[in-house]
Image (spheres, grey):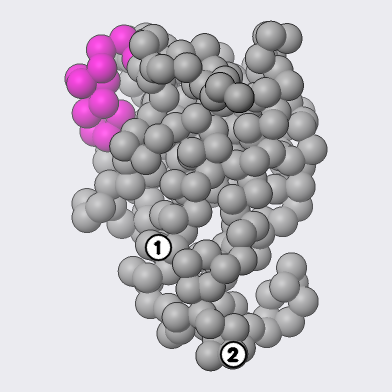
Amino acid sequence: MSDPVPLATGRAFFFYTGHQDDESLWAGQVIAHHALVGREVHIVLGSDGSTSAIRHALNGTEPNGWWGGYHYPQREGIAAPLDYKAFAEARDRELLRAAAQLGVPAGRVHLRVPERSSTITVAEAERLILQYEAQYPGAGHYTTHWTDPDPTHAALGQALRNLVVAGTITDGRWVVRRSQIGKVPGAVEYAVPSTYAAQARHMARSACRAYGAWAPPESYAIGRHSVPAELDWAESGAANVIVKNP
């Protein structure tokens, strides 16, 4: 069977994800839809995701609710103790596998090594977005909402909002996390046309499953350890929710 994702020939589309999993949690169908219609989709990582508490769980020093207790690294084949760098690299591998399911090849997943850090400021996020806008003038830019409770998500959202309000970016949108649906003014469901809807949902579900792959030392199901309820929601096929205007 031929791949439903065509060769990318359309206008560039960027999704700025705060951490390795946000793109699948709240924007999987958005990204898949743009890939299915032939746009040149890119995913840009805002932070390295290294400070997640799941690192301690994998190192066997804290229990994890989804796992149902403690890990025993030596017996389970975990390359512990995982330091911040090794943990971030493991998260990168999950992102790359998820992106492939969304129709985004590894060459268009921008991990930003070595300039990234564990956080990103609004000013840094503005420079990041402008960097890609300069390379791809008139591209579409999506990220998390500026009122998101996570500081990295909010910084990306505020940066894009600033640039849209200033007129520097002409096509900016924001995705809304599940817990904020119904609370963010102007938020609407992202409508995937019927021609692509079933395939986009399938691709979004498959991306979520990449975050549940348990195959140490290559894959540690970090997403599943961290946000199992969010992944369940995204896998359910629930519509993504976006804000179109700042």
- Image location (x, y in percent) of residue 117: 31, 57
Question: Is 84 situated left or right of 187 in this image?
Answer: left
- Residue at image location 64% in from the left, 45% down from the top: 208
Task: From the image, give the main secondary structure of the stretch colored magenta.
Answer: helix
- Image location (x, y in percent) of residue 189: 71, 19
Is the residue 66 above or below the residue 192 in the image?
below
Q: Secondary structure at mark 1?
A: helix
Q: Earlier in the sequence, mark 1 or mark 2?
A: 2
The number of numbered discs placed on residues in the rendered structure image is 2
Q: Is residue 97 visible?
A: yes
Decide: few, some or many residues near mark 2? Use Cα within 10 Å; few <14, some 14-19, many ≥20: few
Residue 88 is labelled as 1
Q: What segment carries the magenta color? A: 127-140
Work out which quarter of the rendered image holds the N terminus and state it: top right
Q: Nearer the viewer, residue 145 or 197?
A: 197
Decide: few, some or many residues near mark 1? Use Cα within 10 Å; few <14, some 14-19, many ≥20: many
Question: Is 237 situated left or right of 145 in this image?
Answer: right
Question: Is 202 situated left or right of 150 in this image?
Answer: right
Q: Amino acid at mark 2?
A: Arg
Residue 56 is labelled as none
- Image location (x, y in percent) of residue 243: 59, 20
Please name the residue that numbered disc 2 is placed on: 75
Residue 100 colored in magenta in the image:
no
Question: Is 84 situated left or right of 157 in this image?
Answer: left
- Residue at image location 33% in from the left, 20% down from the top: 163
* Circle 1 or circle 2, nearest the eye: 2
Residue furthest front as drawn: 1
Q: Secondary structure at mark 2?
A: helix
